[in-house]
Image (spheres, rainbow, N blue to C red):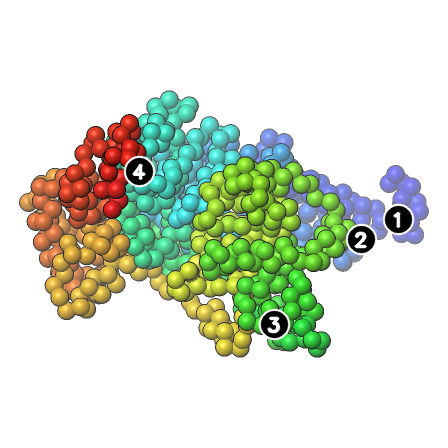
């Protein structure tokens, strides 16, 4: 008891004041914990005032007893508690709307696997300080550092849009660049929104609308009709050009674009740009939220979409949830015959304090049973050894340039003669791991590909694969295993760089180029680097680039030093490249190029929507101004912009009177559709040519005539 404690001390007066100070500190902590979990204390929301009262009494007690050290501690704790309240998810989202409040209650629920009590600094700055939750701006570009929690920001904006247009039953389009990211985003949104009664659906990347998707889109029951639709730019473009917003019967109210820096990436970037331009022109209630870690000119992009109602919410400070080091790993010959040493050299760190001036030895001897001659000239083997050593810290992704290389690396890892010994050491350090999830996925793979399929044995050693040679379902299961921490190593191709949120401790790159020798853009590289050192990871995230020579190491240093450039439309380079040939710009001759095909489809759709040749001719420049590229092209060169306008006039005369509905329904330019129809006619193919009763008959040559 307090009395017994005071009787036993040599200075009861000081001890009494110390007890009083500690009691008030404890009460302040209790108030803070209650507010963090419930959003209120005793049914009231003046948490700061309640804590300040106890901190003040604790401070007074310290002053009375001249407890200098405890006095300083109390002042520090008071400031810390005030900051924690400011960052609390309850404080940031207070009084937004009922949907947001219910969502927050769900996020902090103790039954959640990873409850969220505080916003990360970039999230707080965007949602509260920059006012995203309370803004009515139509176009917002959110540019935050990698691993800043942009998806959660998007979720709050989605809830705001759904609440804003609830009476109209408005819906949200969430656009992600890859199938893998579509799957992951859809799974997360379903997990978080289903308890709120919000239906989330996804559409496949296939360039057609099958019966199942049509039924899903046409659902009218408020309890089962989708409110959020996740898909790739190509699929959402096909939906909207096919008039599906009208068929759905509910307005598109918000477009979320994940990895928005892809606007500048070749033909896919132009497709996305023209999709946003189409939505902006045809969907009256549309709003835009563009998410990216890399847009230096976000204000310009937002202004393009909504000149009178836009903002760029860029967090300027270089914030990271964890330390991160980018290193080059290179082997050197060991002292014994056949031995080798593998050393790391830091080339970029998130903080100067973790930069190391000298090489760091990662391992030596014959790791994975390899000898010097096997690693001396093999980037795949260097990457495999590096991953094996780094996997002791947590899950590692190994990035290979081509699909065959992923199998080579995985086989090398699985053939480790010391695997059983390492597994035993890991189990002794971290305890036994359940094998149920691995067994479940192994059984699925065995049933889909056969029991002898190599991936089955690899999974038993907690090695996974992720590439286009595997089915979509298998790749989704690989992602699921990584998210649950069940895999030690995932070997993937470079296409995984597009923002998939794998929580890993390290990334090892045997290649920094895509399969056809093109360097991975800086945006994709830094996006991939962001997979390590995330908020829920412990320790420094390592991104290791494999090198086998000093020359390659120097190439990698220069590559890492490349900066992300401002976002530019692909249309500018397309027009300039075409005019550099010294010939008139004739659009109908460029249909065979993917990027120009996307532009011609945009023109054909606009022509069809306007519906009158003379009116389209008058509005050509307005249609073109809907694209970011034309606006910037006109700023750079009025002459070049005028050449494009003249070329579009000529193209409009060519497509006049053509059945342009086929362009919208197929996703091909009119020239491609026309050639296909001509070929069908020349081959003598008719609708009855596809009669299943005769199609596969030896006497029927329809398939041969169709495919040549």
Say whether residue 598 is visible: yes
- Which mark, residue 12? 1
Q: Is residue 203 or residue 499 the one in the foreground?
A: 203
Which one is earlier in the sequence, the residue at label 3 or at label 4? 4
- Farthest-out residue, front: 699
Asked which quadrant contains residue 362, the reply is bottom right
| Sequence-earlier tag: 1 or 3 | 1
Q: Residue under circle 3?
A: 373
Q: Which residue is mark 2?
A: 65
Q: CA distance from mark 3 to mark 4?
A: 51 Å
Rendering coords of residue 247 (x, y %): 27, 29
User: In the displayed structure, does residue 140 sit left or right of residue 34?
Assistant: left
Circle nearer the viewer, 2 or 4? 4
Q: Secondary structure at mark 4?
A: loop
Q: Quadrant of residue 578?
A: bottom left
SS class of the residue under badge 1?
Answer: helix
**Nearer mark to the viewer, of 1 and 3:** 3
Quadrant hosting residue 594? bottom left
């Amino acid at each position: 008891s307090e009395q017994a404690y005071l009787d036993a001390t040599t200075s009861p007066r000081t001890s009494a004041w110390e007890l009083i100070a500690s009691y008030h500190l404890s009460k302040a902590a209790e108030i803070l914990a209650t507010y963090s979990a419930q959003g209120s204390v005793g049914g009231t929301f003046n948490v700061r005032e309640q804590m300040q009262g106890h901190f003040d009494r604790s401070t007074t007690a310290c002053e009375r007893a001249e407890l200098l050290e405890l006095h300083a501690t109390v002042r520090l704790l008071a400031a810390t508690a005030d900051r924690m309240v400011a960052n609390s998810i309850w404080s940031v989202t207070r009084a937004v709307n009922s949907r947001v409040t219910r969502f927050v209650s769900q996020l902090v629920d103790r039954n959640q696997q990873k409850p969220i009590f505080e916003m990360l600094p970039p999230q707080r700055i965007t949602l509260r300080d920059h006012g995203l939750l309370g803004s009515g701006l139509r176009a917002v570009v959110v540019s935050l550092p990698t691993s800043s929690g942009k998806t959660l920001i998007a979720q709050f904006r989605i809830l705001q849009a759904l609440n804003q247009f609830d009476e109209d039953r408005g819906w949200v389009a969430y656009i992600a660049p890859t199938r893998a990211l579509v799957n992951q985003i859809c799974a997360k949104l379903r997990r978080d929104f289903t308890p709120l009664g919000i239906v989330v659906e996804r559409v496949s990347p296939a360039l057609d609308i099958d019966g199942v998707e049509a039924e899903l889109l046409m659902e009218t029951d408020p309890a089962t009709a989708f409110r959020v639709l996740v898909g790739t730019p190509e699929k959402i473009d096909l939906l909207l050009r096919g008039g599906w917003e009208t068929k759905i019967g509910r307005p598109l109210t918000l477009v979320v674009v994940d990895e928005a820096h892809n606007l500048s990436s070749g033909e896919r970037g132009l497709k996305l740009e023209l999709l946003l331009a189409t939505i902006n022109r045809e969907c009256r209630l549309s709003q835009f939220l563009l998410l990216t870690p890399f847009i230096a000119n976000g204000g310009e992009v937002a202004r393009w979409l909504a000149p009178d109602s836009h903002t760029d919410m860029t967090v300027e400070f270089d914030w990271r949830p964890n330390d991160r080091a980018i290193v080059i790993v290179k082997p050197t010959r060991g002292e014994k015959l056949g031995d080798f040493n593998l050393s790391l050299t830091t080339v970029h760190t998130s903080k100067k304090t973790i930069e190391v001036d000298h090489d760091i030895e990662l391992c030596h001897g014959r790791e994975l049973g390899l000898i010097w001659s096997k690693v001396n000239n093999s980037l795949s083997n260097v990457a495999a050894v590096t991953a094996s050593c780094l996997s002791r810290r947590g899950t590692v992704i190994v990035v290979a340039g081509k699909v065959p290389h992923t199998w080579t690396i995985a086989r090398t890892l699985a053939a480790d003669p010391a695997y059983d010994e390492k597994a035993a050491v890991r189990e002794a350090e971290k305890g036994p791991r359940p094998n149920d999830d691995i067994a479940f996925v192994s059984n699925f793979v065995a049933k889909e590909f056969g029991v002898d399929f190599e991936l089955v044995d690899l999974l038993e050693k907690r090695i996974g694969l992720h590439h286009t040679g595997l089915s979509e379902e298998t790749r989704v299961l690989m992602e699921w295993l990584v998210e649950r921490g069940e895999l030690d190593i995932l070997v993937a191709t470079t296409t995984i760089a597009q923002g998939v949120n794998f929580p890993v401790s390290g990334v090892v790159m045997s290649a920094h180029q895509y399969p056809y020798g093109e360097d991975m853009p800086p945006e994709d590289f830094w996006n991939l680097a962001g997979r390590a050192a995330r908020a829920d990871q412990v320790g420094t995230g390592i991104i290791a680039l494999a090198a086998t020579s000093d020359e390659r190491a120097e190439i990698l240093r220069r590559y890492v030093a490349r900066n992300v450039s401002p976002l530019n439309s692909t249309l500018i380079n397309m027009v300039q490249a075409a005019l550099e040939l010294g010939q008139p710009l004739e659009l109908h001759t460029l249909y065979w190029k993917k990027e120009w095909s996307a532009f011609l489809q945009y023109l054909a759709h606009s022509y069809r929507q306007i519906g009158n040749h003379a009116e389209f001719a008058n509005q050509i420049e307005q249609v073109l101004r809907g694209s970011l590229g034309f606006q910037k092209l006109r700023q750079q060169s009025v002459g070049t912009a005028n050449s494009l306008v003249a070329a579009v006039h000529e193209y409009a005369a060519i497509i006049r009177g053509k059945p342009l509905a086929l362009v919208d329904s197929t996703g091909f330019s009119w020239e491609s559709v026309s050639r296909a129809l001509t070929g069908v006619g020349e081959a003598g193919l008719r609708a009855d040519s596809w009669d299943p009763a005769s199609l596969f008959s030896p006497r029927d040559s329809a398939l041969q005539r169709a495919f040549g």
